[in-house]
Amino acid sequence: MAAISSLVVNVPLIRPSRRISRDDDTYSNRRLNSVVCVRSARGPLTVLHINRLSLFSPTSALYITLVDFLATFLWVKGVYLKLVQGKHAHVSYATVGPDEPHAASTAWQDVILEKQELDLLYPGVEKTKLEGFLSSEIPSHPKLYRGQLKNGLRYVILPNKVPPNRFEAHMEVHSGSIDEQDDEQGIAHMIEHVAFLGSKKREKLLGTGARSNAYTDFHHTVFHIHSPISSKDSDGDLLPYVLDALNEIAFHPKFLSSRVEKERHAILSELQMMNTIDYRVDCQLLQHLHSENKLSKRFPIGLEEQIKKWDVDKIRKFHERWYFPANATLYIVGDIDNISKTIYQIEAVFGQTGLENETVPAPAPSAFGAMASFLVPKLSVGLTGSSSNSVDQSKIFKKERHTVRLPVKHNWSLPGSNMDLKPPQIFQHELIQNFSFNMFCKVPVSRVQTYGDLRNVLMKRIFLSALHFRINTRYKSSNPPFTSIELDHSDSGREGCTVTTLTVTAEPKNWQGAIRVAVQEVRRLKEFGVTKGELTRYMDALLKDSEHLAAMIDNVSSVDNLDFIMESDALGHTVMDQRQGHESLVAVAGTVTLEEVNSIGTKVLEFVSNFGNPTAPLPAAIVACVPKRVHVEGIGETEFTISSNEIIAATKAGLEEPIEPEPELEVPKELISSLQLQELRQRRMPSFIPCSPEINVTKVYDKETGITKCRLSNGISVNYKISKSEARGGVMRLIVGGGRAAESSESRGSVVVGVRTLSEGGRVGNFSREQVELFCVNHLINCSLESTEEFISMEFRFTLRDNGMRAAFQLLHMHSVWLDDAFDRARQLYLSYYQSIPKSLERSTAHKLMLAMMDGDERFVEPTPKSLQNLTLQSVKDAVMNQFVGSNMEVSIVGDFSEEDVESCILDYLGTVRSKGNYEMENAYNPIVFRSSPSDLQSQQVFLKDTDERACAYIAGPAPNRWGFTVDGKDLFELFSHISTHDDAKLKSEEVLMVDEDTQKDVQRKLCGHPLFFGITMGLLAEIINSRLFTTVRDSLGLTYDVSFELNLFDRLNLGWYVISVTSTPAKVHKAVDACKNVLRGLHGNKICQRELDRAKRTLLMRHEAEIKSNAYWLGLLAHLQASSVPRKDISCIKDLTNLYEVASIDDIYLAYDQLKVGDDSLYSCIGVAGAQAGDEITGELDIFCTFNLLSLSHENLYCAASLEVEESVDGFPGIFPVGRGLSTMTRPTT
């Protein structure tokens, strides 16, 4: 959650694997553009999560960015389309031209076309016109400006108002690891580091509120800067300064020997940090998928032995070969009004770059020079096609360069190919826990440029959505044959191809059954197709979602728009805005037939459903990743054996299983009938009551924030805010106080397993899981359920279309059904996760640290096998449902609704919830304590046997909670009561916007006594410490690539903690830990300066401004607003937020810093080291886990220096099921 939102709600967890493998959002979205991505998973990462079906989300597939279409609904370019609904024909038409973009309705009727109906409707000429329409081009984004300078540099500009007064500038150099020679593996990434971090002009932007980063993949190196439009220090417009920095970074870097050596150390550390088992699995998948080309041998991070050797001259030569304007594109998206001025600024900065020693070469076959033709779209020149700035290609001057890169060769998985089937490849490793099977099909990218292209994507999405749902709901036994089955159909700009992947994950003992089931379900869909009901259902859901996103056209962030444009350009897709995308989708939806959906979907699945057939497409690769040893009940650890022939046999067995057509399922239109609701209201008599005894009003409205607080007669507190930021959309969250902290010593794990049981079951009232999920699909509801240490939460995202909000409230109202088989699955998932911990260096290290610091309290770690064995369905039900008491529940709603509608839903569905007694948080859980110090567990180590060397470490210690309470019962505000007003020197920050000294003092006094004092000052302190850690441990000492400081401050529990995470090499990790401790403890010796504080303020305020229009962000702000266990949270914590940041002084930061326990008697650390010799020098180690009745674990790979169980407190299961092919192989953001 964002920094300022975390001031009011936070999930306090150590998430080592998330930290270790983190990417910035820009990079994550850039790597994979999924046209059709369907995943069905029972894995622990998902709670009850029902995905919205979307073609036009900026972070999913065909969010086709653009606006203003010419003529739509069903009269498009003269094509007259009828929709048959029962016996009636509905005709929607408009005679409009290109200057009348919104003249026609875009409403979609609940109807599908059969093939014969289409033939009857469009005989002869009409059918010809339909074909002409489908072959016509979809519209291009009307606000997207494209141009090219004389030196060949291309630029793309898009005005976008979200966030206001900020812009994104990304320089994409079309060169990556694919361009490296055999002795240059990793040099593209090295140049990224040296050029970016060596730029003095970039450094000068750091004090302006700008932030920057860079990354490298196979085909691209991208440098990006997110900046405010202006700054007080920049004499106005910041864009020229940002462009100047990008020009220096990309085309005029200073290859200083000192910087090269510094980044060499950083990259070697990054290489070891990345080298997790997930990374190695991804490498194996890509190596076999692309075995015929260089992609399999050019992972961007490079080879260690080569990285150590390159000198400055070698690095400079690669830069000279590939870094020139004609081989780059500049993207600018943001709050820019004057396009002509922006173009002038681009020309002023970049116009002369690359024109030195000009020659006139023959025109390159590709506008990008080095880009392969299939990766590069043919871009129009100038502003939307023409501009005075455009130039004839034959007149472009640029420096002579080496021969352009040859296109990457792929062996396509096409029918009738003469290639032989490659035998399944097996990657076996001691750190792999589960079995995974991956079957790949690789085809060229199909560019989405016409209505027919878009129609094909829509039909694929419908077809694969049906498969996702069927797999997700069909198998509900206590011992399902698979953990997850995923079918992903994705375009990849990184790899220059479209890949369809069937991925099956299972417990090793079930691997053959899991493959059979997956193949059987794919075959069932191929043989019988989607049903008429499925087509109607998913078509309607996609159109509803598309309409919702079109309504949000003015609320899409600049970075989301930019990421999609960059990826679409790489793939050759036409870029549309959300409104154009929706109108185009509506136009083609009326032409879709059931027969064609099944036909095109069958082709996607043919490599699986017809496996072994001579006419079927050959899989590009089949790869199984398997453990070396597995646990067998009654036997213990045994070798896991598997062969390629066995994998083929299991696949063919799925082709021979008997199959039957999918039955139509009745989907409820509502979960509570109007008659049932009327009876409930008469029986429960819901009403609003005063929010507190002191205020005799039933609703408290704050005009400044737009927040309304109310309380129902059954004790449930409600906060709501009407927001137009996300048009016709809304979010809702129920928070139930208690969480895992309420688990008794006899029922450890009961809450977390109980919540997972509800997720696994999915039944409510008399409706099955299938019916509930389809109900959510029909109403575009996303629902998630999770538990943390201090509360249980249910979250809903919905649209206001077709009573979507009322449907979400109905789902919240309904009682869940507790099922034995769901409980068995939930318990097995946690057991499997516990078994996997010793195979992860990060998780085992973090677990060991947490148990040491929290004195072995299992509520902050994963439940042990012994605890899991003691649980029953009744015990987990009681543990969860005892917390669902009216006075212990708070519901917050934010969205584009009316006061009348939301209050009607609140009374109808929340007010009629049966009231239960009172829930006293203070008496609901056993005391929580930190381990008494000193202790021999304060400094520990974990050793993991591995083929490759790696190291990580965690340093942690106690902190107060967000509201100034400590674990030993102290109220820090009482200790501060003696503090007088600070002198005027405290208020020297240039960002304090106060009128005079008296006002400054008043506000300063207000901050010291404000309930959010520690939330504000701790947040600023974390920013300052993070900056110092990077500067010292990474940049100056070269001991790490990745180091971070995080604060976990609870709201309801009287404690918090801080965590420093650092990765390094085994040789340097102890020095890195010492350096981190010195930074943490050195704030008094090396005083915080005003510049550091101002920078921290700008960073946090910038994030706040960027997210303030997000409904989900407001949910975080509203959390605990009326919670009795968080008495200090009130409306001022939201209203005063920005002012409190602005007036915070250095003295305030030190008051907060002094509350962190950083001395030797309070600080805990744990170092994890992996390698072939790890732990050999330690004798007499004890196993990291105890042996329990439920299972016996052998841990030959993991040793520790003390007898202690290792577990982790997580809200998910990071690292077990990597999502997305090869995502971990790309380099991390440079900073």
Image: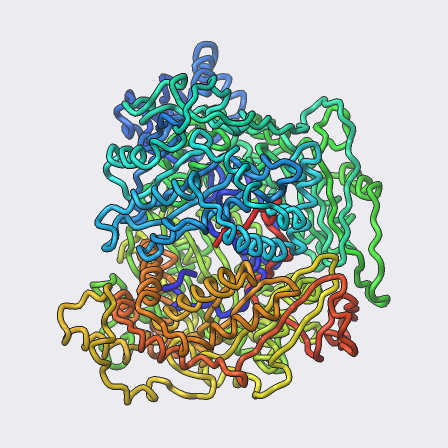
Q: Is residue 629 visible?
A: yes
Q: Compared to 1095, does 769 lie above or below?
A: above
- Determine the image quadrant of residue 89: top left
Q: Compared to 939, does 388 lie above or below?
A: above
Residue at the image position 21 percent from the left and 50 percent from the top: 235
Q: Is residue 926 visible?
A: no
Residue at the image position 33 percent from the left and 78 percent from the top: 1128
Residue at the image position 31 percent from the left and 55 percent from the top: 208
Q: Compared to 987, does 466 lie above or below?
A: above
- Determine the image quadrant of residue 635: bottom right
x, y (%) of residue 28?
50, 47
Horizontally, residue 592 falls left or right of residue 1133, namely right
Nearer to us in this view, 791 or 1026? 1026
Instruction: Name the residue at the right extreme.
Output: 635
x, y (%) of residue 1077?
52, 74
Horizontally, residue 1196 falls left or right of residue 1104, namely right
x, y (%) of residue 146?
35, 29
x, y (%) of residue 831?
69, 66
Horizontally, residue 224 falls left or right of residue 534, namely left
Horizontally, residue 349 falls left or right of residue 502, namely left
Nearer to us in this view, 213 or 775? 213
Residue at the image position 84 percent from the left and 41 percent from the top: 645
> How was this image coloured?
rainbow
- Quadrant holding the N terminus: bottom left
